């Protein structure tokens, strides 16, 4: 079922406002995304339990969700990342014989990188297209200001300004995701 951007915005606003139907709507919209991430992170056997923990944590920390700082999907994936880390920590505390061998999840480093990338992609999506491109070229591709100017055709001053304006905005979005998982 296709969901329009307007519907997504309404669900996110309802969630942020603490509406009664918000958790169910958020689960309907993003449950499979979170579950898929959890399957890749902790394995099929544990994914349903971790997914449930994510939505319980999200509901309890609902007052911390701010649509201006990022999408609900990104916020939920940030929570999922930390719930998966918690899952791995608990497993390390159990005797080895208690760990099912058929689970087959990605290693902790692999799922942490995936979560970081999803959270970063969500934060980047908040930027205007030109600024997003400049940031990606500088920080993901490692290009210099001059190389970015050459590649994009933008004046070097514009490249520098776009970077200067974008970094604080990204930092706020990433800090918000970090705060919710550590306090929610």
Image: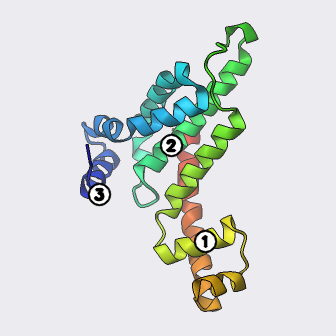
What is the secondary structure assignment of the residue under circle 2? Answer: helix
What is the secondary structure assignment of the residue under circle 1? Answer: helix
Please report contact status of discs 2 and 3: CB closer than 8 Å, yes or no: no
Label 2 packing within 10 angstroms: few (<14), some (14-19), many (20+): many
Residue 157 visible somewhere in the drawing:
yes
**Mark identifier at residue 135:** 1
C-alpha gap between disc 3 and disc 1:
25 Å
Residue 183 visible somewhere in the drawing:
no
Label 3 packing within 10 angstroms: few (<14), some (14-19), many (20+): few
C-alpha gap between disc 2 and disc 1:
22 Å
Place of residue 174 in the rendered image (x, y in percent of width and height, measured from the top left) = 57, 56
Which comes sooner in the sequence, label 3 or label 1?
A: 3
**Mark identifier at residue 77:** 2
C-alpha gap between disc 2 and disc 3:
19 Å
Q: Circle 3 sits on which residue?
A: 5
Say which residue appears at 33% left-offset and 41% top-offset: 29
What is the secondary structure assignment of the residue under circle 3? Answer: helix
Place of residue 165 in the rendered image (x, y in percent of width and height, measured from the top left) = 56, 77
Label 1 packing within 10 angstroms: few (<14), some (14-19), many (20+): many
Say which residue appears at 75% left-offset and 12% top-offset: 96
């Amino acid at each position: 079922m296709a969901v329009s951007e307007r519907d997504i915005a309404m669900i996110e606003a309802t969630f942020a406002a603490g509406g009664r139907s918000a958790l169910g709507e958020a689960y309907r919209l993003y449950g499979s995304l979170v579950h898929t991430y959890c399957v890749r992170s902790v394995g099929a056997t544990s994914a349903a339990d971790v997914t449930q923990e994510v939505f319980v944590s999200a509901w309890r920390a609902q007052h911390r969700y701010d649509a201006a700082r990022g999408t609900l999907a990104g916020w939920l994936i940030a929570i999922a990342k930390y719930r998966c880390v918690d899952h791995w920590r608990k497993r390390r505390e159990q005797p080895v014989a208690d760990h099912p061998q058929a689970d087959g999840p990605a290693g902790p480093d692999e799922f942490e990188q995936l979560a970081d990338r999803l959270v970063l992609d969500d934060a980047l999506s908040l930027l205007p297209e030109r600024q997003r491109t400049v940031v990606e070229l500088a920080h993901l591709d490692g290009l210099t200001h001059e190389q970015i100017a050459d590649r994009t055709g933008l004046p070097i001053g514009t490249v520098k300004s776009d970077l200067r304006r974008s970094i604080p905005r990204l930092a706020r979005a990433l800090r918000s995701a970090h705060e919710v998982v550590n306090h929610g």
